[in-house]
Image (cartoon, grey):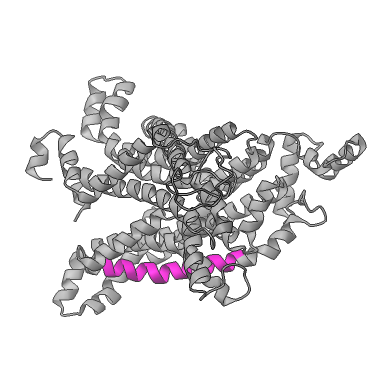
Amino acid sequence: MSASSLTSPASAAPLRRLSRNPAAVLSASVILVMVFLAIFAPVLTPHSYDTVDRAHVLSGPMPGHPLGTDNQGQDIWARLLYGARVSLSIGVIVEAIEVLIGVTLGLLAAYKGRWWDTLLMRVTDAMFAFPDLLFAILLVGILRPTSAFASFLTVFVALALVNWPSMARLVRGQALALREKEFIEAARAIGVPDRQILLRHLLPNIISPIVVAATVDIANVVLAEATLSFLGIGIQPPFPSWGRMISDALPYLRSAPMLLVYPSAALALLVLSFNFLGDALRDALDPRMRQ
Amino acid sequence: MLVYIAKRLLLAVPTLFAVSVITFFLGFLAPGSPVDLLMGQHGDPEVRRRLEREYGLDLPPLQQYGRFLWNALHGDLGRSFANRERPVSQLIAEQFPTTALLACLAIVTAVLLGLPAGMLAALHQNRWPDRLVMGGVLLFVSTPPFVLAPLLMLAFALRLEWLPASGWEGPAYWVLPTLVLAARPAALMARLMRSSLLEVLRQDYIRTAYAKGLSTAQVLRRHAFKNAFLPVLTVLGNSFGYLLTGSFVVETVFGIPGIGYESIHCILARDYPVIQAVALLVATLFLTVNLIVDILYAVVDPRVRYEAGR
């Protein structure tokens, strides 16, 4: 550990390191721009995501439709903007739920030990037995919401259910390693209540791996939503989803390839940015990883 | 060693049990009765009762689960709702080989691409080969199969016309799906191989090996590779799970008649017996593969064996 990181406040050094990393700055900017586009979608396009222009179906860029229209005559630019809303809100909200559940259960398991711990490990073991997205696919496929709005809720629930175990395991592992450290023992010795030890002493010391994992996880959640929607069991029309736009574009691959390219590029760019930012955060928070 | 394997096998039993409970009771979350699906346009209560008896749906849930588990243990996975004449196990037996072939091709491709790429990156740390590989890693980790598949299809099948766009009729048809499916595992393996090799190359015994006058190739082959490869084994196990669900997407895009393609159809048609069977099968396979990887780990690395034996 360098002398400067010992003297400067703990939180400032990583941020400074992050701001010196061009990849981090670029990816953070991309994410901010996408958030901006998503929030101001109604200002940035006169069309709604489900406005149908029957006179122009599968048209290229033209006045009124900056990126052209899809096979139903819907404005692609508008659908991209509102699709960003869907992707980002699902990414952020699911991640928030995941962190809440994961941190709570992980800390409890590590600190209370005994059967809390056994229970957590067995339940997560069973969840991990379903590879990757399979559990979410099953859950959404079986619930099969009938309304478009219900499809949102189902996707939220399914993705949060699938993703919390890895966060809980991470928190548990980190907390277990810290539990035996002297400063925790000291706090316990002078009679600090459990709740305070957990929140004031344990949690602040494991916050950086949580932040890194959560950032990378947002990328995975965004991808998962897009996959479900691509398979036709995620967000239901008329709501736009980049995944759905990609599957809708497949029949027109030869005649209108741009229909595929726009949502693919948007999705890859957003996911790439979160992955880049996560990697950069890891480097910034733990300089030893850099080497 | 045997104690370790026995321990791992015993631990897998409750997990498998939990998996079967989860997959079975997921079906009860479904809105409406599955019999409604079977009945179609019929309104006849007599037909309904007969169907309920036929599928055992008139029994209490716990008893239904008991039957499901008992039959599954005997290789009987029930019958499809959509296709009542065909047992699910037969359906799976017909389609699984295709998916297995695709998954094997993909994992071999991923190893052949990922390991050398990771080693190249580690040996040229922070120079252009490293940056190129790591850039590719982030790109392929961020590009989902359903983006990569149509793009490759567009380029190599529709524009260049080098390869067929869809179907599953011979080796030429295997190329694109394999590449799409292998992309992410290859990227993950390259990343892990790089960091693992960098770690190993810093060890004292590597310095000793260089000091003896060995060439880089000799050091890699005799001392570094084996130790660096160990952590990659774990990714191999996890990748297998990704390949199984990735095949849902890849088979759908390329129109490959495998388990993934079939499953999506069944999910859209609410054919629960098939969905449950596929979930059970995939989870069991995934658990088995990870168990094998863990055991292999202990076989290859005496340190793991020592830790586990204590």
B103 inside magenta stretch: yes
Task: Mark yes or no: residue A169 visible.
Answer: yes
* Magenta highlight: main SS: helix
Residue A120: percent from the left, percent from the top? Answer: 47, 37
Q: Which corner quadrant of the image does residue A45 belong to?
A: top left
The residue sitting at 58% across, 36% down in the picture is A151
Q: Which corner quadrant of the image does residue A172 belong to?
A: top left
Residue A232: percent from the left, percent from the top? Answer: 59, 47
Residue A98: percent from the left, percent from the top? Answer: 43, 35
Is B218 positioned to the left or the right of A155 in the image?
Answer: left
Is B18 situated above or below B1?
above
Is B304 situated above or below A286?
below
Most foreground residue, B169 or B195: B169
Task: Mark yes or no: residue B3 visible.
Answer: no
Is A8 positioned to the left or the right of B177 in the image?
Answer: left
Residue A5: percent from the left, percent from the top? Answer: 12, 40
- Which of the image's four quarters has the C terminus of chain A? bottom left
Is A221 positioned to the left or the right of A145 in the image?
Answer: left
Number of numbered discs visible in the structure rendering: 0
The residue sitting at 48% across, 42% down in the picture is A79
A11 inside magenta stretch: no
Segment tinted magenta in the rendering: B99-122
- Which of the image's four quarters has the N terminus of chain A? top left
The residue sitting at 54% across, 55% down in the picture is B286
The residue sitting at 27% across, 39% down in the picture is A208
Most foreground residue, B198 or A269: A269
Most foreground residue, A290 or B300: A290
Is B184 positioned to the left or the right of B9 in the image?
Answer: left
Most foreground residue, B265 or A236: A236
